[in-house]
Image (cartoon, helix red, strand yellow):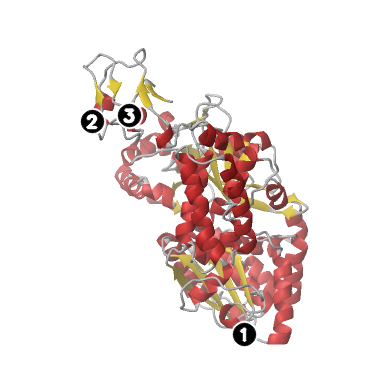
Amino acid sequence: MSNVSEALKIEDWRLTSAEDLKALQKQILSGRDPNRPEIVVCHGTGCLANGSEKVSDALRTALADAGIEAKVMPGIKTTGCQGFCSRGPLVLIRPGGLFYQRVKPKDATEIIEKTLLKGEPVKRLLYKDPASGDTILNEQDIPFYKLQERVVLHNIGKIDPTDIADTIAAGGYQALAKALAGMTAEQVVEHIEQSGLRGRGGAGFPTGRKWRSALKAIETKGRPVYVVVNGDEGDPGAFMDRTIMEGDPHAVLEGLILGAYALGAEKGYMYVRAEYPLAIKHLEVAMVQARELGLLGENILNSGFSFDVRINRGAGAFVCGESTALFTSIEGKPGNPRPKYVRSVEEGLWGRPTILNNVETWANIPLIIGKGPDWYKKLGVPHSTGTKVFSLVGKVNNVGLVEVPMGVPVSAIVEDIGGGVPGGQPFKAVQTGGPSGGCIPYSLKDTAVDFDSLTKAGSMMGSGAMIVMDEGDCVVDVGRYFLRFLEEESCGKCLPCRLGLSRMREILDNFSRGRGSEQDIEDLISLAQAVQDGALCALGSSAPNPVLTTLRYFKDEYLAHVNNQTCPAGVCKELITYTIDPGLCTGCTSCARQCPNNCISGRKKEPHTIDTDQCIRCGICRETCKFDAVRVS
């Protein structure tokens, strides 16, 4: 180390050993008062979209105006996503964890004057549990957080992702130092094998087995070998990987460096979609800071091991989440899949042995190396160890980011942590695995959330998106949505995907119009199986899953569209009619004012009517009506 001064200037440090890293951590912690109040403001993408940047600015202004002495002045820290997205912007007061939700800039002065100066909570900003009606003061007592087990997310919401000092204070890069100082590359691979870690990108392939296969390929093919982060998260409703990259970029980077050490790679790539600008920014900052400290680049920690990484921005093509398409994109060619006659561990990037894992998988690596495979195996279930991060979205009260041990039932996530469906009704289905996954019905709510159990139910883990549906969602429409998405995102290189998905979507379009027959349902199943068997890559082979699972669990709803020309959920426009219940309509005229086709008439304070011939069935009247007078039949 060099230029160590009493006043911490982290930019003056150049770490040359594990001891240096521990000394730096000790010095950082010695300069911090754990009892000093700290205002933590969520600056994840969701909270930023709701104005959290203005909230943090207002808090800084309010602090300055309060005239608090410099020695007791609370700090303001901005962090990555704290998870409870439907309640943002979020503000926490630490120590203690006082939790404020849906904070606005105008609340800043009251928070400073009442909470910081007088020690009293601002009651209207506290969380109120919709189930019990209780007002809850602290983050750790809120069921959404209390019922989780945050392992991969343990630092997110606590550290400033743009400040490596925060990461080092929290134990960052200690696993890397441990490996470089006292473990062989073989021992690192053995730890990953023993942990039972399976890839979090969707397929669930054992990570240690993949690494071992790459080592065998290197023996015959030689080097170079590459390590790659798949950050091309494209599933609708998914934001797990984005949150990890934004909130704890050093965890991903440290995991990648450990993988490079295990395989002897000198160069790596992070493939991140361009729609994630904040993630890219934080990763770039992390890489610069790590290089300056000697944790990335030449001769890391004076170990003789050198490794560096660059970021490649994906243009947003969903198919580039597939391994071979991702590789061709990095190589500067159109991101089209190629046949997998040879696995990427043997011939991946530029035809060389390559390890590709997704963001969450890489973020698990430092935990396993730091705490050991036996610790990791205690989490989850034997065939699916560890935890899994999910984005919980759709018709659910608590929308946000959730981390639970593998093997918990679907109901524990949707009903206990997610708070169930608004209105208290049972959920209809949960879509897991994104467009490539399937729909789990309420009757299977006790299905364990692990790789094998979800596959048995006809779905898949996928990257971790969970979309909750209620009785207002039509399974035919859900199938159409995902088929349209995948049809547009397909590269069109193979016939089953290019024509098969299009024809499947056409059949579902007919069902949504009350056309077709029961034979069409049988033809749809046959076609789906042909696409599964014949598609070139996983995009095509998994595309029929949403249709097949909805047919498996909700066939009666398909038959209602075909035989009765009705949509039980009231979604398919050509099969529904909007009317107004005169007994409930107050004549407020709100629906008439909002109707884009001017087909609602009636006098003020008298029941209104809808001209069904002119109605375009947009649903705005139903959304506008405060008296539940608009009916769908």
Mark 2 vs mark 3, foreground winner is: 2
Residue 37 horizontal/vertical position (percent): 47, 45
What amino acid is labelled 1 in the image?
Pro
Q: Which residue is mark 3?
A: 621
User: Which residue is at the front of the view, 82 or 319?
Assistant: 319
Above or below, 301 against 61 in this view is below
Residue receiving disc 1: 224
Q: Which dot marks residue 598?
A: 2
Identity, as a three-letter code, of the amino acid under mark 2: Asn
SS for tag 2?
Answer: loop
Taking depth in this image into account, of 530 and 197 the one nearest to the observer is: 530
Front residue of this view, candidates 384 and 22: 384
From this viewpoint, is residue 157 visible?
no
Report, in whole angstroms, how far the alpha carbon at label 2 lies from the one at label 3: 11 Å
Q: Residues within 10 Å of mark 3 (few under 14, many from 20)?
A: many
Q: Give the CA separation, mark 1 to mark 3.
A: 62 Å
For the point 52% across and 56% down, the residue is 501
Q: Amino acid at mark 3?
A: Cys
Sequence order check, earlier mark of 1 and 3? 1
Q: Secondary structure at mark 3?
A: helix
- In the depicted structure, whether residue 631 falls above or below residue 478: above
Q: Residue at x 50, y 30 (%)?
A: 422
Disc 1 versus disc 2: distance between alpha carbons?
A: 67 Å
